[in-house]
Image (spheres, rainbow, N blue to C red):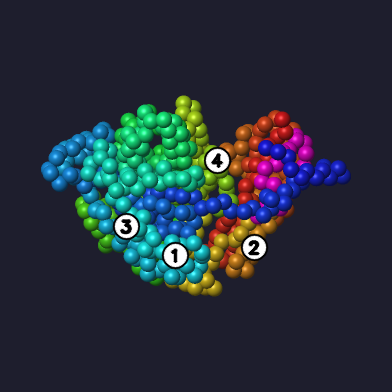
Amino acid sequence: MRKIGLLLFLCSGIVLFTNSLASAQPKSAKARTIVTTDGEVDDVDTFIRLLLYANEFNIVGLVYSSSQWHYKGDGKGTKFTSEMASTAKRYGERTELRWPGTTWMEEYIDKYAKVYPNLAKNAKGYPTPDHLKSLIRVGNIDFEGEMNTDTEGSNFIKKILLDNDPSPVYLQIWGGTNTVARALKSIEDEYKGKSNWEAIEKKVSDKAIIYAVLDQDATYKKYIAPNWPKIKVLYNSDQFWSFAYLWPRVVPAELQTYLNGKWFAEHIKFNHGPLLEAYYVWGDGQKLAGDPEQTQGDMKEVEKFKRSQYDFISEGDSPAFFYLIDVGLRSKEDVSYGGWGGRMVQSATNPYRWEDGKTVTDFDPYTQKQEAAYPQTRWIPVLQNDMAARADWCVKGYKEANHAPIVKLNHSANLTIKPGQKVALSGSATDPDGNQLNYKWWQYEEVGTYPGKVELQNGTQPNASFVVPKDATAGKTIHLILEVTDSGTPQLTRYQRVIAKVAE
């Protein structure tokens, strides 16, 4: 990283870095993304939240797929046993499994259509309902892991991966990877052995980025990993549980307020229009078509599992698109930085794969322990408040609703520092609604490579500072987050991240 615009104030020893380009902080182009989904209840709730954020990224495909938990069957009575040991033991031989059909995304987009005019009053960039419907395709759904035949969905993904736009395509895997695997297999079948195969292979490998929540079929391990080893993979196996079915076991009691029935009843489920009326919560009387195991809407089940009415059920796949929302944390730049979509580190055995897991932990101040889920859990209050604001957008005009502050740095986002120096940090923010703003600078200790803490001076002011510890050795990094929260209802938060690197 280059040192830009260094101003050394000899009298105070303060090092201030300025960069006219950095101060403007232009937003990057919206990320292109394709969603593949097996239609489980947590996929439906994830999809509803995705629609609330559809202005934040460029959705280019919505594809029905299958998984170890959900498949249609071939209609011929063919019997199938899962390749995944736990599912094989649980279900045995089946001709179909808990299949929710291939019309549910259209049905929720119809509900989105009713709130779309109001959403569009509150933010630019929301896609029209007709455009979203034009992106829907049916992929490989007959059985778990089926990837033997081309489908409309796999061909649609194939076309996007082969187009002439070199920008990344984030492939969100909410179920199994089989439809994506089929698209890649079709590309391989068409081009391998031809003179342009190396160029095609590189083009697709450079473009495709898979964000997978667990392995819900075997197609990644059996086909994608060995045949497309340079496709980047972000693999979430632990952190998503704080937003999934097991949240009561994972989320500290102090943060469960944002997931309980009282919160959801007030902020999401009721009085926020037809899209959010359809959101699934415990004890709401709703029943997902085709899935006999989706019983959370029954009050008897609420009592059985010791939940409360309207409690959160699950959005286990939402971290896949949280990762794409630009809130200033720079995690799309490097997923190891951590952000709304969690934090992952590069695999020790595969440089193209980033993973979470038991060794990727953040300090949980509520349990006073390093926790594997906390890199995701720590954002629950701001994520939920942000969703509540979007829920308001469904029914309120711009002047009645709240909107997030806009946060900027007054110097470069990347600093070069020296041990013993005092470094000035400076940020500023504006609020679209004229709300008061609260500033907080904090060190993301687990992300920086410097193993110690720094002491921030004036950490609740726009302008703060810290002294670089004398034991900070060359090449070590310190990550400093400027967090700005408005005083609106609900309170909304945005950020900027400064990465300070010790000069080498």
Residue 162 lies left or right of residue 461; in this view the side is left
Residue 258 occupies which quadrant of the picture? bottom left
Q: Secondary structure at mark 4?
A: loop
Is 268 rendered above or below residue 450? Answer: below
| Neighbour tally class for label 1: few under 14, some 14-19, many 20 plus, Cα within 10 Å | many
Q: Which residue is mark 1?
A: 391
| Neighbour tally class for label 2: few under 14, some 14-19, many 20 plus, Cα within 10 Å | some
Q: Where's residue 490, x and y in %?
A: 52, 64
Look at the image and tell me in which quarter the N terminus lies: top right
> Which of these two is toward me, 293 or 130?
130
Q: Of the residues tagged 3 and 2, which is closer to the observer?
A: 3
Q: Which residue is mark 4?
A: 334
Q: Residue at x 29, y 48 (%)?
A: 152
Residue 147 occupies which quadrant of the picture? top left
Q: Is residue 409 covered in magenta?
A: yes
Span highlighted in magenta in the image: 408-426
Q: Which residue is mark 3?
A: 105
